[in-house]
Image (cartoon, helix red, strand yellow):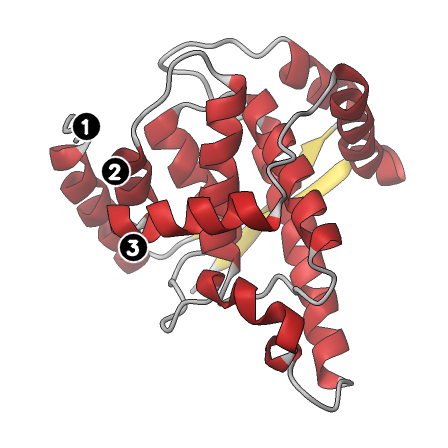
Amino acid sequence: MVSSTSLVISPRKFRSDLYSYPYQADSNTPLVVNVLASLIERNMARNQSISKNCSSPWYLSKDMKKTRIFECHETPDMTIQSYLERIFRYTRAGPSVYVVAYVYIDRFCQNNPGFRINVTNVHRLLITTIMVASKYVEDMNYRNSYFARVGGLTTNELNKLELEFLFLMGFKLHVNVSVFESYCCHLEREVSIGGGYQIESTLRCAEEIKTRQDEDRRYNQCAGLLL
């Protein structure tokens, strides 16, 4: 049986973690990962509600055919929270990378107003934006082939996603200090709701845990290979 617990994040704790994150090998997952996962899940729920009231699917729009590259035929059997935690576990990308990725996701949706984040495109969008954000923020980065393995894609697939993403963004990747601060404040306001941020953390059953451990072992075998 699957049960759940709640993780409470205070605004002060969130800001401290965001600006004073300890970049160490054994550091915990940044709190911004939890908040970003929750925001995206809420956005997906809202989009699903909107799609039910639409007469035709959003992806049939002529202008939106170019974003179909982010659609996958088989929906990954992994929650947004687990996927983001996985990306952090293998890339150790700091909090600022996820904030910039959040900026990129917002810009992407604004530049492509017919695009809707859903279960079929969210994983590809996340690994692409986080990889691009990491290249923008970090001094040293893993190669695309490594990010592809972490995200469950082939190198060729991720290369195409990155290129298409850059064109759909109009190559507007610069994030100045004021923009970065404004998005940090937005995330902090999300945390401030009700004096704290309640995030549901699912406790997986033994079989699910074993599956994840097996998957981690497979990826650990190729983690050191940067092609």
The residue where tag 1 is placed is 226
- Mark 2 secondary-structure assignment: helix
Work out whether 160 lies above or below 46: above
Q: Where is the C terminus found, in terms of image quarters?
A: top left
Tell me: 48 left or right of 193.
left
Q: Residues within 10 Å of mark 2 (few under 14, many from 20)?
A: some
> Which mark lies nearer to you, 2 or 3?
2
Q: Quadrant of the N terminus?
A: bottom left
In this rendering, is residue 147 above or below 185? below
Q: Which residue is mark 2?
A: 145
Cβ–Cβ under 8 Å for marks 1 and 2: yes
Q: What crowding class fits label 1: few (fewer than 14 Cα within 10 Å), some (14-19), or many (20 or more)? A: few
- Residue under numbered circle 3: 206
Callout 3: SS: helix
x%, y% of residue 108?
A: 66, 49
Disc 1 and disc 2: Cα gap in Å?
A: 7 Å
Left or right, 29 with respect to 217, comes to right
The Cα atoms of the two marked residues, 2 and 3, are separated by 31 Å
Distance, label 3 to label 1, CA atoms, is 32 Å
Q: Residue at x 59, y 37 (%)?
A: 171
Q: Residue furthest bottom?
A: 55
Q: Position of residue 221 (x, y in %)?
A: 11, 35
Tell me which numbered mark, 1 or 2, is placed earlier along the sequence: 2
